[in-house]
Each structure stands twice: as structure tokens, then as C-alpha cells.
Image (cartoon, rainbow, N blue to C red):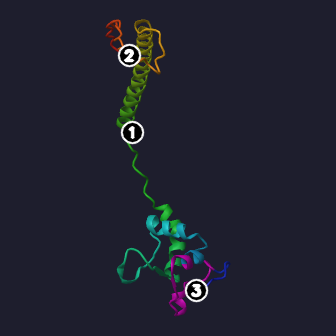
Amino acid sequence: MVIPNKTALRHEAPSIAKGKLEIISGWKDIATYLQKGVRTVQRYEREIGLPIRRPAGGSAGSVMATKAELDGWVAASPIREAFQLPQTPVDNTTPLREFRRHLSELHRLREETAELRAAIRKSLELLQTNLRYALPEQDQTRGCPSEPRRVAEVLAFPERKEKVM
């Protein structure tokens, strides 16, 4: 591994002009040469075209780059930013409208669920009250095996059909 002088890193003439082809191998060495982190260098390769080569054409595994290519890429990066095409504006109206519709449906369902829970709670209380009046007052946990249990007469619930909007 060759660690360059930090001040001379980008100010030297490309190493190919000196007649030597210096190759850097491995993500860690490339990141050190560019004075960046390994993940940053990998992101640069993936997103903005850092010139990385893979032996035997593999998509993963060992990587290498030449100092000349890296220096050229660093020197050309302001040009790359100047010619970056503007992104086309995204039409968010349809997904936003659908999201708002789903959100209002969610609120409606929450209200309906709260009303149903309240109705179930009232029905349960009424059932418990009816069972207390209909069953004889005895210890319900033990029960007397000699006496048959009476079936409670449960009051009918009023039918309420309300439309929830």
C-alpha cells in the first residue's frame, strides 16, 4: 500500500505521465488514497461513477484502481456537477390524493371501532346485570352440585341500526 503525501495528493501530475502505472487494490487502500471512508468510496462508485475495476469481471470481491484514473476522476468532478441534468419534477397529486382518501378512511374506521367498542361494553354490562338478577344468589365459583343450575332469562337487546358515515 502506498500512502501519498496529503498536500501532494491532488496537485501532482498524473502518475501515468511519469511512466509508472501505480495500482491501488482494495476498498480500504482506495479510500485512504482519496481521504474518504470505505462506504463513501463504495457509494461514489455505485452512484457517481468512481473508476473502479474488478479482476475477472466479477461484480463483487476484490477491486482495484489506478492512481491516474482516480486523480482524473477527482479533477473532473466539478465538471460532472456542472453538467448534471436537472431532475424532472415528480407529479405527486395522484398519490397525495389517494393518501388523503386512505387517511380519512382510517379516521372513519377508528371512530366506528370506538363506537362498536362502546356498544359492546354496554351490552356486556347489561348481560352481567341480567345474569345477576336471573341467577340465584349463591357462590358462583363453587356451585352446588346437588342443585341444577337455572338458565338465566336474558332481556332482548334493542335493535339499533345506525349508519356510520
Q: Residues within 10 Å of mark 2 (few under 14, many from 20)?
A: few
Say whether marks 3 and 2 touch (CB < 8 Å).
no
SS at circle 2: loop
Amino acid, disc 2 = Ser
Of labels 1 and 3, earlier in sequence is: 3
SS at circle 1: loop
Tell me, for residue 30, which label it has, or none: none
Report x, y in % for residue 105: 38, 26
**Left or right of 153, for residue 84:** right
The residue nearer to you, when weighing 123 against 150, is 150
Point out the stretch of residues depicted in magenta. Answer: 9-29
Report x, y in % for residue 38: 55, 71
Of labels 1 and 2, earlier in sequence is: 1
Q: Residues within 10 Å of mark 1 (few under 14, many from 20)?
A: few
Could you tell me which residue is drawn at 40 percent across and 45 percent down? Answer: 89
Say whether marks 1 and 3 touch (CB < 8 Å).
no
**Left or right of 95, for residue 44:** right
- The mark closer to the camera, 1 or 3, is 3
- The mark closer to the camera, 1 or 2, is 2
Of labels 3 and 2, earlier in sequence is: 3
Residue identifier under label 3? 1
Quote the CA–CA distance across marks 3 and 2: 94 Å
Residue identifier under label 1? 92
Residue identifier under label 2? 146
Report x, y in % for residue 3: 62, 83
SS at circle 3: loop
Residue 69: in magenta span: no
